[in-house]
Amino acid sequence: MGCASSIHISDRVVHHSEKGSEDSHSPQQTNTTQHQGNPAAGLPLKPPSCKTTLTEVQFGPMKLFKDPLQVLLVFAKEDSQSNGFCWACEKANYRCNVARTPESALQCFSEKHHDLVIIDHRHSRHFDAEALCRSIRAVNSSENTVIVAVVKRPDREEASVMPLINAGFNRRYVENANMMACYNELLQLEHGEVLAQFKLRAGSAIFTALEQSQDAIEITSEDQVIQYVNPAYESTMGYQQGELIGKEIIEVPKSEKNKPDLLETINSCIRKGKEWQGIYYAKKKNGDSIQQNVKITPIIGQGGKIRHYVSINRPLNDNNKSDKSSERVQAESQTDITSNKHKDRRKGSLDVRSTTSRGSDGSSQRRHSSMARIHSMTIEAPITKVINIINAAQESSPMPVAEALDRVLEILRTTELYSPQLGTKDEDPHTNDLVGGLMTDGLRRLSGNEYILSTKQPHHFPSHLASPLSLNDIPPRIAQTMESEDSWDFDIFNLESATLKRPLTYLGLKIFSRFGVCEYLNCPEATLRSWLQVIEANYHSSNPYHNSSHAADVLHATAYFLCKERVKQSLDPIDEVAALIAATVHDVDHPGRTNSFLCNAGSELAILYNDTAVLESHHAALAFQITTRDDKCNIFKNIERNEYRTLRQAIIDMVLATEMTKHFEHVNKFVNSINKPLAALEENGGNSDEESVKSILTSPENRILVKRMLIKCADISNPCRPQELCIEWAGRISEEYFAQTDEEKRQGLPVVMPVFDRNTCSIPKSQISFIDYFITDMFDAWDAFADLPNLMQHLDNNFKYWKGLDERKLHSLRPPPE
């Protein structure tokens, strides 16, 4: 059995590209005619692929897998329009059936439950398309099916679509037999309405989980109108669903046992987008009070606003606990809420670090301050809270229980459970836009406009590769500029100017030589020089920010971090080589636009990488393509296969770690798996337990976390650079974002970061938001590990600088001249 490469007609239904369903030579197919091509265009149909590929779809935290699209075409007669859609289905590798009558269409739909049905609405003499649509909608399985009406091109006035919508159609298609028009329509449907319906289907699984949950669950609207309660809630509280749905929360009787201000405190917390958890007395229908452990989570939806509240209520095992005990737990809940405000400690204060005593009071006091900050860190993903609870429970547990909890902690620290629940932050548009622009993959836009970043374009190979530059041949002025490259305050812009915008090759030669990369890879210096030149040639010098100067800056920061004592204790030589290479290539061929832009524009790269880590995947893949394509620049040519695989995996992992959607996951895992265990060891007797410290630093899992954190900090270290360098980088990234906003408006694409409008943007506010949201916690963690007082001092100074400009209501990079 194989995939059919033609259309089979039987019982008035055409089965198009059915995978191995029937043998076309079997006796049952004797009345079958074969359709060899598109008679309208004279083109042969492309045989569909026999391989069924599942498409991965992310739906919130759920990972779904979608089969190839199933399409039903209902056309009474074969014509150029039906042939156009047939060809489009072939090209898209969809599974397709064609029905000629309403009866066969209904029968076929009942058997196969198609994702998409396209009905010919042009000729009422053949059949009533609207009646057929209503009949399909009457089938239970049609709820998530998208149905399209093919209509005649209007002669004069445009007709209303309401009759089609009332009949059950989702969309209309004005007749156009052009095959690419049909193909584009199918693609837009697949990535628009069909994908949305596919996600909605998954919602039934979620509701099944809610219905069967033993926890009492209540969902309310943003106005706190009850929208859903599950059976566990009904049995716990004694109400029936119908008695609660549609009522406001305030209409439901309350228990008198709660503290008078508790409700006000809860509402104040959740309306800010923060989760509340604590003890609460609820009043059952019969008047009894029941003590519950309650967690209320605000759900951020359209427009970045709270759209729902989800309340999970679990009755306490001992309902007879004293009111005094309850008050104590409620007070602890208040302490948790207050501590969450620590995240915003910079707001409204210019002296942002007065409590940390950095730099001025000696190294030991500053190190103690770093450890204290690690223990008080508020990167509170749900899993972080779980780990803290288990840690507290261990202190009073017998040895077998403590050991079992140790194993639990080990499992929790090595799985993907660290992404925090992000909400709005004081409704700051700069923060919201930065988070939206950097941590999402954009909105799928149904449009013919496409931003073409072709993966098929030839990449640059400089003509001077035949006689590459030597380390000994570096011009004296450039060599002098690089004399201080081992200092954090090294000025990359001086090198950019001296090298005529080719800093990466020169700095790479020096740093790779200092770390002995050629010796490790067993490659000639000439090969390394050629490799650096071809990598630099594939950075876009026209980008204001993402050019080879940024790559050189990240390489410099990476080399600086690799020299810190703690980092050297943790990493092996292969890790150091991987880090230097990853830093060099981490943004190669960057188009100067964000992932969200590429996804919204339907770029070739976004399609190739399924809207997931688009640029980072491209940087890593292209780096290896360029490197291995030509022996003259293949720095991996002489290393052993297994070593190459290990090195390649480490480089890819580090480049992918620079993608911002997993920023908080990486920081959380680093804090919980490395910072906190090291801090605990230091507090229990300094560094005397060298074996324990070594086991934390050198475990394979933790070495990966160190490398990810290292390149992440190097990649966005601009706010920790000397002030003039920080200001220059801020201007460059702002200009790149301005240019993206300009292009989005020109092309009619969604504007990913509206605050980055060159006419209205406040650069100081954008920098303050970036530091507050992304930089502070990450560099606190990295400083506690690697000991970086100079960076933290620069960060303080730069934050005060931006804060000062903002308080003067200035929008520019620098204050006006006196």
Image (cartoon, rainbow, N blue to C red):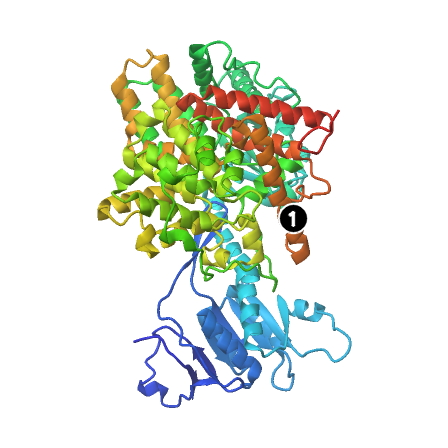
Q: 244 or 759, which is in the foreground? A: 759
Q: Which residue appears farthest toward the bottom when viewing the image?
A: 31
Compared to residue 101, the image places residue 754 above or below, namely above
Which residue is painted at 42% across and 27% down in the image? Answer: 486
Compared to residue 45, the image places residue 427 above or below, namely above
Amino acid at pointer 1:
Thr
Quadrant (top left, top right, bottom left, bottom right) of the C terminus:
top right
How many residues crowd mark 1 within 10 Å: few (<14), some (14–19), many (20+)? many
Task: Give coordinates of residue 371: x percent, y percent.
Answer: 43, 17
Name the residue that disc number 1 marks: 741
Q: 682 or 19, which is in the foreground? A: 682
Which residue is painted at 43% across and 15% down in the image? Answer: 367
Q: Is residue 292 left or right of residue 225?
A: left
Task: Give coordinates of residue 221: x percent, y percent.
Answer: 64, 41
Q: Is residue 349 among what the camera can see?
A: yes
Q: Is residue 148 left or right of residue 464?
A: right
Question: At numbered mark 1, what does the secondary structure look like: helix, strand or loop?
Answer: helix
Tell me the quarter of the picture where residue 463 sits: bottom left
Q: Is residue 263 among what the camera can see?
A: no
